[in-house]
């Protein structure tokens, strides 16, 4: 597969203040008791694949240290990010899904959560972040490019899963984005 190296984008931008977002939402690690509300949230967030409730329960239980959720002041689930450290690459955090409830989008929630999760996992030895993005998902691509830019991390991308090869025609291509190394706590 071809790999495309991309220089870091260091241009100035108006990023949402992470502190401001964390005032409006409480960030925490998920527990198994969040599994059902996570499952319902994912269903409200196309084009995400809806996994089984059991899969979401396992994400909240076994991958809680590498996942994060945001809830509103009254305890409603606003957003969830599932991730795990790749067993063969313990310095790499793989972001599985990012889901922000439609009513809470555009407030910097996803970006702030990604940064909080990255900072948490840096202490576990994580230095790189990977995710896959389908070419049609512009918001997701911009979100991760913004994260890499904000953290001054170079990134590369290459095809990972193909529509025909891996999905039998039933799913868009998935392109692997890999950014890092990350070392410093963000702004
Ligand atoms: C993609 C998604 C997670 C973004 O969540 P969000 O909290 O609204 O994102 P943020 O407010 O943190 O945005 C951060 C940056 O991402 C980019 N971005 C986010 N949503 C965007 C959109 N709809 N269009 C263009 N850029 C977007 C922007 O660069 C933005 O920074 P800016 O507002 O300063 O320009 C959310 O729209 C979502 O849950 N979508 C459905 C599920 C999905 O596609 N998940 C991603 C794949 S795993």
Image (cartoon, rainbow, N blue to C red):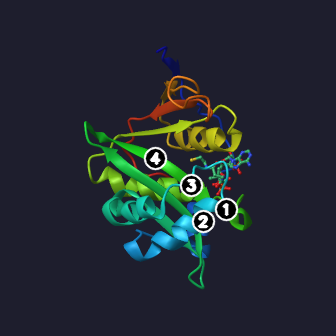
Mark 3 to mark 4 CA distance (whole Å): 16 Å
Mark with earlier residue (4, 1)? 1
Mark yes or no: residue 155 visible.
yes
Mark 3 to mark 2 CA distance (whole Å): 10 Å
Left/right placement of residue 75 relative to residue 66 reads right
Name the disc covering residue 125, or none: none
CA neighbours of label 4 inside 10 A, class few (<14), some (14 to 19), many (20+): many
Does the beta carbon at disc 4 come under 8 Å from ligand 1? yes
The residue that appears at 70% across and 60% down in the rendered structure is 105
Q: Which residue is mark 1?
A: 44
Look at the numbered disc 4 and give the secondary structure of its residue: strand
The residue that appears at 57% across and 49% down in the rendered structure is 49
Does the beta carbon at disc 3 come under 8 Å from ligand 1? no
Mark yes or no: residue 27 visible.
no
Instruction: Judge depth for marks 2 and 4 and give the one in front.
Output: 2
Q: Which residue is mark 3?
A: 50
Name the disc covering residue 95, or none: 4
Look at the numbered disc 2 and give the secondary structure of its residue: helix
CA neighbours of label 3 inside 10 A, class few (<14), some (14 to 19), many (20+): some
Mark 3 to mark 1 CA distance (whole Å): 9 Å
Q: Quadrant of residue 138?
A: top right
> Are dots 2 and 1 in contact, CB under 8 Å?
yes
Total marks drawn?
4
The residue that appears at 56% across and 29% down in the rendered structure is 168
Q: Which residue is mark 2?
A: 41
Mark with earlier residue (3, 1)? 1
């Amino acid at each position: 597969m071809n790999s495309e190296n991309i220089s870091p984008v260091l241009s100035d931008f108006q990023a949402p203040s992470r502190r401001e977002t964390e005032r409006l939402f409480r960030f925490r690690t998920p527990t198994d008791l969040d599994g059902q509300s996570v499952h319902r949230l994912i269903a409200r967030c196309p084009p995400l694949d809806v996994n089984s409730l059991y899969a979401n329960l396992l994400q909240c239980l076994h991958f809680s240290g590498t996942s994060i959720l945001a809830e509103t002041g009254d305890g409603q689930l606003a957003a969830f990010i599932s991730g795990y450290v790749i067993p063969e690459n313990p310095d790499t955090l793989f972001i599985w899904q990012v889901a922000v409830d439609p009513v809470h989008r555009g407030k910097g929630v996803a970006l702030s959560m990604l940064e909080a999760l990255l900072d948490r996992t840096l202490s576990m030895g994580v230095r790189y972040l990977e995710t896959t993005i389908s070419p049609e998902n512009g918001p997701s691509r911009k979100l991760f490019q913004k994260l890499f830019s904000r953290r001054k991390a170079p990134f590369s991308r290459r095809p990972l899963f193909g529509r025909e090869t891996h999905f039998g025609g039933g799913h868009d291509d998935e392109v692997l984005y890999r950014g890092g190394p990350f070392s410093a706590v963000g702004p």
